[in-house]
Image (tube, coloured by chain):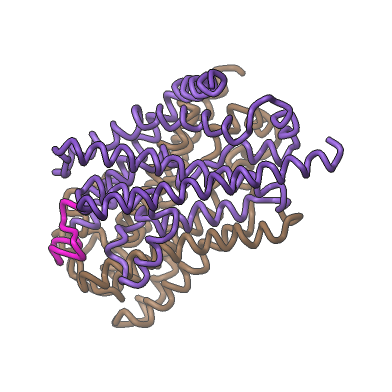
Chain colours: A brown, B purple
Amino acid sequence: MAQYPLSLALLGLAQSLSVIVELIAVLVVFGHAHTLAGFTAREALLVYGLAGTAFGLADLLIGQVERLGDHIRTGTFDTMLIRPASPLVQLAADEFSPRRLGKVIPALACLTWALATAGIDWTLQRALTVPLLLASGAAICCATWILGACLQFFITEARQAANSITYGGKALTEYPLAVFGTDTARWATFALPLAFVSWQPALYLLDRPDPTGLPDQLRHTAPAAALLLCALAALAWRTGLRHYRSTGS
Amino acid sequence: MRLYRAVFANGLRRYSTYRAATAAGLLTNTVFGLINAGVLLALFHARPHINGYDATDAITHVFVTQALLAPTAIMGPPLDLGERVRTGDIATDLMRPAHPLAWWLADDLGRAAFQLAFRSAPTFAAGALLLPLDLPTDPARWAAFTTATALAVLIGFALRYLFALAGFWLLDTRGLTSLLFLLGPAFSGVLLPLVLFPDPLAATMRTLPWAHMIQFPVEVFLGKHAPPDLTAGLARQAAWAAALLALGALATSRAARKVVVQGG
């Protein structure tokens, strides 16, 4: 890719623009509504920044696992299995490109701006928790990506279906979760814990009661939710890998 | 003519074998339709009328848009032609007794026909089952919408054809096409209905071909255009389709000359 510097720059720009374009959509929506689910535009940018940064980081680190189906189909996954390195790491590192930083940078900028202007009552504890919340969010996104990829062990063409979970999850977490109603908020908290990527962290930083009525203690469990989901993803990966090996090929 | 009919049938048949991908695409369209509809429902709950749209219009817009994404291929994928230009296989295509533009158009129309039937209609049906969407009852409106959709598919093809041929002049088109597959939809009503954008911005975006692929057909579906405006709008769509296809034909002849010059 570095052989075509203009293309690399344009692709990186495209990544950044995808984040910026969706940010503009959030601003347009809040421009009309002023508040949604009790969140103002500035507070919504906090949610967007958290979601965008977490997903951007996950995309950078693990996003390529979504191409597992392609690798299985073309036989390159078998090549990875022969090598003395973790196939997951190889898969994630395949086609690693710094252009994906293009997604992280605008999201991080938005987050930084929101942290400064959203009216957060800063304490030392809150300040120290921000990196932890981001790390948990990114871990949840990584785990979601891996779970989606594991689908492709069983159905090789399931990439698009997996994408509807990963990228759909991204679209969901970019807005304050309560916007989608209480049922969706519950599913996104207990079924697939995407609520801990941006929603619960935002509630914690803004020190606001949950409009959907869930207990306030929940917002402190983001790292636990991340660990749980990562464990599930690891289990799914190992199961998928074993299943794949057992089919021979 | 029989040749192009065969190419059309071939395109349709080829896409009919991608059952899993079609099902997955249908799922994706439905999921994103629901998420976008969720946001707009919250918005219109706070502001019930915005620039001529109400809540039902907005959620119908979302699902008609999701239905149109696949046949117009406004967000990609690019034509295989681009890869053939990059590898040089295009030389074989140019030796055939068929105009490349007509050939690829026939193939793409086969694809679009399949996707309209097996992805677009089910996507909209899924939305209609889950949400109270607005369905036109007037046969004139259905006729207008069918025409608008057909023109949208033509515009979508013409754009992707030009992107593919750009490989004759730009060594690597991936960056440029990636950008256009992203920005185009943003300007077209896929991201948000154009009526939500500030008026001057929305007016500018409406002049571009992408808005004629999504926003205009959706507005026809919603019945937002009375006959004089409707005819004018369809004429504008047709003009864009004609202009882009003409440009494609011009690019093809220039490109063919290029290939010959390099001694292929």
Query: Residue at left 77%, top 42%?
Result: B257
Residue A3, compared with residue B202, is above or below; it is above
On the rendered structure, is B101 left or right of B19?
A: right
Q: Residue furthest right?
A: B263
Nearer-the-camera pick, B118 or B109: B109
Nearer-the-camera pick, A104 or B140: B140
Pinpoint residue B6: horizontal percent, then vertical percent: 53, 18
Query: Residue at left 24%, top 57%?
Result: B39
- Let me know if residue B254 appears in the view: yes
Quarter of the image that includes the C terminus of chain A: top right
Query: Residue at left 43%, top 72%?
Result: A110
**Magenta highlight on residue A212:** no
Pinpoint residue B13: horizontal percent, then vertical percent: 47, 19
On the rendered structure, is B83 left or right of A122?
A: right
The magenta-colored residue range is B42-57
State how many labels appear. 0
**Magenta highlight on residue B51:** yes
Rendered image quadrant of residue B176: bottom right
Residue A108, compared with residue B172, is above or below; it is below
- Let me know if residue A94 appears in the view: no
Rendered image quadrant of residue A20: bottom left
Nearer-the-camera pick, A91 or B249: B249
